Image (cartoon, helix red, strand yellow):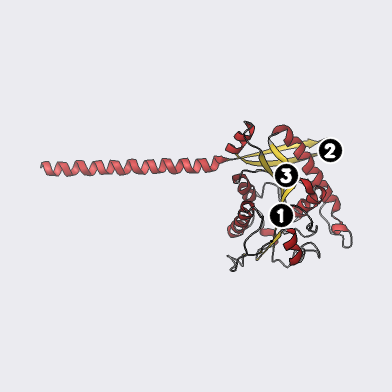
Amino acid sequence: MAWGIGRTDTGSNMTRGITILLALCLVVAGAYFTASKWAIRHQTLVFYDASRGRPVAVDIAVRRDKEMQSEAGLSILPVAIINHGNTVRFTEYSFLANVLAVRGYMAVSIQHDLDSDAPLVTKVGELYVGRLPVYERGAANIDFAISKLREMQPNADYDHLTMVGHSNGGDISVYYARLHPDHISKVVTLDNLRVPFMVHAKFKTLTFRSHDPQFKTDPGVVPDQADCDKAGITVVRTGFQHTEMSDRGPEDVKESITASLDKFLDDNTGSITPRTTAPQRSGLVATASK
């Protein structure tokens, strides 16, 4: 009888122990996912540019610990500007903003288009197929947003920007870099089609190219391989569709892009090691700059 009672007590103790262990695991897991969720702070702000009579909305993604360090004067936040594609919202590049924020950047996504703006048009034969006014407006939006952010977060590096953009936003990124080459740290584009890359710049460039028959890159936008090597331009030729390069795209597309972007940001040379095998969906085949 005593033996039987002893077995019952032991089993009960083991059950309680397992229950407590499982509870602790759940607590730890919950803390991990909570920390992951709250480690990056997102904030959407709308500034008003009275000189042009238009609002400029921005979405800020920043690691809370890095932000606290900068506010305490212990560090300077690097700044990345994200520029959206035509008909895509500025909030639809969180997969890029989060990678940049994790790396310690203050990632600033800017809404360039308003519902009241004229639709994007193509005028063959004109500079940038007639889209220069759109790029000029985008550059003005960036300058205005930076001027407001300097007031809010002075401990950030607005003089060495990382420019990131998809499609039309990629062209805005390259155009802005052409205007302010001495204030650019890196340029990253996702299938920009109109504005040629700089071949005599001091900064490194990473560009993802789609394999999409509906979106053709204009001649001269991407230099030949020899010039890319000299200029530090890394061309990543993918099997992806042009419109997949935002939050709307499949997970494997976003994962491939962020993996290469992370490598580019991590590498002091700003280049990506060529890959001999392509990942999912024809994936990435990188041509690395020297």
Percent x, y of residue 260: 62, 57
For numbered disc 2, what is the local secondary structure? loop
Q: Which mark is residue 53?
A: 2
Pointer 3 residue:
160
In the rendered image, which quarter contains the N terminus? top left
Percent x, y of residue 229: 72, 63
Using the numbered discs, state the Cα–Cα distance from disc 1 to disc 2 in whole angstroms: 35 Å
Say left or right for 275 vs 148.
left
Q: Residues within 10 Å of mark 3 (few under 14, many from 20)?
A: some
Using the numbered discs, state the Cα–Cα distance from disc 2 to disc 3 in whole angstroms: 28 Å
Percent x, y of residue 187: 72, 52
Q: Is residue 129 visible?
A: yes
* Rendered residue at 68%/35% (across/down): 155
Q: Is residue 83 visible?
A: no
Name the amino acid, label 2: Gly
- For residue 157, above or below residue 120: above
Percent x, y of residue 46: 73, 37
Name the amino acid, label 1: Lys
In the rendered image, which quarter contains the C terminus? bottom right
